[in-house]
Amino acid sequence: MARQDFPLEQQLRKDIIEAQKARDQVRLDTLRMALGAIHNLEVARTDRKHPEYGQPLTEPDTVRVLEQEAKKRNQAIPLYKQGGRNDLAEKEQRELDILQSYLQSSQISDEEIRAVVARLIEQNGKEFRKVMPQAAKETKGRADGARVQRIVREMIQ
């Protein structure tokens, strides 16, 4: 049984071909890495010990993989700069920019997050411990957790 490709995955494959034609090595390597990470998750789910064993890959899974890869780059950049390796920091930044371009299309805006948080504050009051978990749950896969947390803290003040 062949699984279907998701729009994000199809876009990655199409952009790999374009990067090959344009001889854009950084973009090509980054997109191949992203597709490889998606494939690795799919393979991991065939292991009986994996918590998501047997579940088919979904579009939110592909977005989550890209978010994880972007997060790795965000964490590596300051460490490379601290170690005096600006060349590697710049490479990671370029990769992060490429990954962000794919994540932007699947992310919701700050205004949409504020609407969700406003509704949750109305239902639960202005207590962070009640609002934040529900806000994170509702925006999961569509907004960065740190961004949601910043907006929740801002609106609870």
Image (cartoon, grey):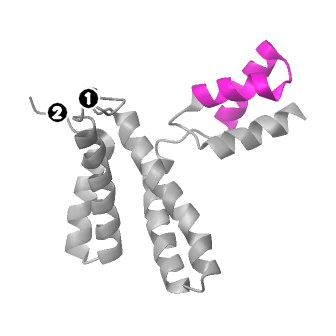
Depicted 113 relative to depicted 80: above or below: above
Q: What's the residue at 11%, 33% (across, down)?
A: 2
User: Magenta includes 112?
Assistant: yes
Q: Which mark is residue 56?
A: 1
Q: Which mark is residue 78?
A: none
Q: What's the residue at 75%, 43% (across, down)?
A: 150
Depicted 62 relative to depicted 75: above or below: above
Q: What's the residue at 23%, 54% (across, down)?
A: 13
Residue interval drawn in magenta:
111-137
- Tell which circle, 2 or 1, labels the residue nearer the N-terminal end: 2
Can residue 118 be seen by looking at this rendering? no
Q: Are marks 2 and 1 in contact (CB under 8 Å)?
A: yes
Which residue ends up furthest to the front in the rendered image? 49
Q: Main secondary structure of the magenta part?
A: helix
Q: Residue 136's x, y, as percent?
A: 63, 31
Q: Residue 54's x, y, as percent?
A: 24, 26
Depicted 120 relative to depicted 153: above or below: above
The quadrant the N terminus occupies is: top left
Q: Is residue 68 left or right of residue 42?
A: right
Q: Residue 10's x, y, as percent?
A: 25, 47
Secondary structure under the numbered disc 2 in the rendered image: loop
The quadrant the C terminus occupies is: top right
Depicted 76 relative to depicted 40: above or below: below
Which residue ends up furthest to the right in the rendered image? 157
Q: What's the residue at 68%, 39% (across, down)?
A: 148
Q: Is residue 77 left or right of residue 26?
A: right
- Dot 1 amino acid type: Pro
Q: Which residue is mark 2?
A: 3
Q: CA distance from mark 2 to mark 1?
A: 8 Å
Can residue 4 be seen by looking at this rendering? yes
**Mark 1 residue crowding within 10 angstroms, few (<14) / some (14–19) / many (20+):** few
- Dot 2 amino acid type: Arg
